[in-house]
Amino acid sequence: MHEELNNFTRNEVWTLEAKPKGARVIGTKWVYRNKQDDEGNIVRNKARLVAKGYSQVEGIDFGETFAPVARLEAIRFLLAYANHHDMKLYQMDVKSAFLNGYINELVYVEQPPGFEDPNKPNHVYRLSKALYGLKQAPRAWYERLRDFLIEKGFKIGRVDTTLFTKKMDDDLFVCQIYVDDIIFGSTNEDDCKEFGKMMAKEFEMSMIGELTFFLGFQIKQLKEGTFIYQEKYTRDLLKRFKMDDCKPIETPMATNTKLDPDESGIKVDQTLYRSMIGRISCLVCACVPGFKRIQGSLISPR
């Protein structure tokens, strides 16, 4: 928690002021999370201070909130493209990424629970940059990163605005953005090192390394090809819905069964059901339409 608040100080996120008369003040809360690697081992404990964005009022606390996010299909095509061109992909995670985005609205938030100033208990913080939980935070961060990359000579994709490319002599550098996670690679390894140094100089990084785990994908980049699988995601899915002790079967029920409503049965939890379907749909994402699959590796399009 102290580390999180130190990030606020380094990034000059806010200023403690007396509460203006009639000003709307947004609450804050702490959120705790365990960061895991591709094997499910806990590698870091995180404490995040977030704003209670659900209390924001459009037109007063925020304006435009849309921020483009890379589609899973785009990530899969990037993996296939990199494999075809013998390009190794790397990933980086910007530390407290949203704290780098500037906001245009006048926003006040409460002091962090447990860290109130004893001499100024009724004061509030005026935000200069985005705070996690604010509706405009993703857009503010995307615009900051986009402007920085364009300033460094990158070209933004015409169709996919989360894809940035740059020609360096005869080499091509690609960079894909997914909120605060960045995937990048080049046909020249030295360009990747220079990009890492450039980003670390502008933003504080929590991780830079070879792409191994991303959005539930476990990724192995080998000479034989790029292998993607979802073993950890599947285990976590079964554990979440208490099905890790169930027996496997190819078809969970007869295909010709006719279902009728059971008026006296237990009512279905629709929220739980939709959550299951949403997570199961991500299990099919490892298969790339339009790409051949040889021994689990992805190669060029047919």
Image (cartoon, rainbow, N blue to C red):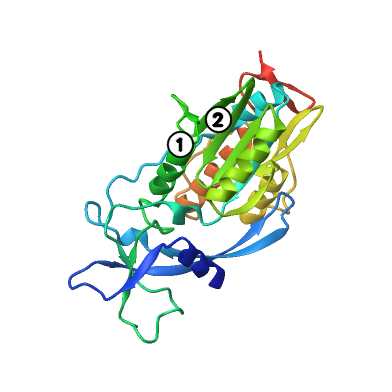
Q: Is residue 270 above or below residue 66?
A: below
- Estimate how packed mark 2 is, as few (under 14), some (14 to 19) or many (20 or more) residues with alpha carbons within 10 Å: some
In this picture, residue 222 sits left or right of residue 130: right
In this picture, residue 180 sits left or right of residue 283: left
Q: Quadrant of the N terminus?
A: bottom right
- Estimate how packed mark 1 is, as few (under 14), some (14 to 19) or many (20 or more) residues with alpha carbons within 10 Å: few
The residue that label 2 is drawn on is: 74
Q: In which quadrant of the rendered view does residue 256 lie?
A: top right
Depth order, front residue of 192/232: 192
Percent position of residue 231, x then y: 72, 44
Q: Do labels 1 and 2 touch, CB within 8 Å?
A: no
Q: Secondary structure at mark 1?
A: helix
Q: Residue at x 41, y 62 (%)?
A: 13
Of tags 1 and 2, the one toward the viewer is 1
Q: Is residue 1 visible?
A: no
* Residue 151, numbered circle: 1
Q: Residue at x 46, y 60 (%)?
A: 11
Depth order, front residue of 136/39: 136
Identify residue type, mark 1.
Glu
Which residue is situated farthest in the front direction here?
169
Q: Is residue 265 above or below residue 153?
A: below
Q: Secondary structure at mark 2?
A: helix
Identify residue type, mark 2.
Ala
Which residue is situated farthest in the left direction here?
22
Q: Quadrant of the C terminus?
A: top right
Percent position of residue 109, x then y: 34, 67
Q: Residue at x 25, y 52 (%)?
A: 58
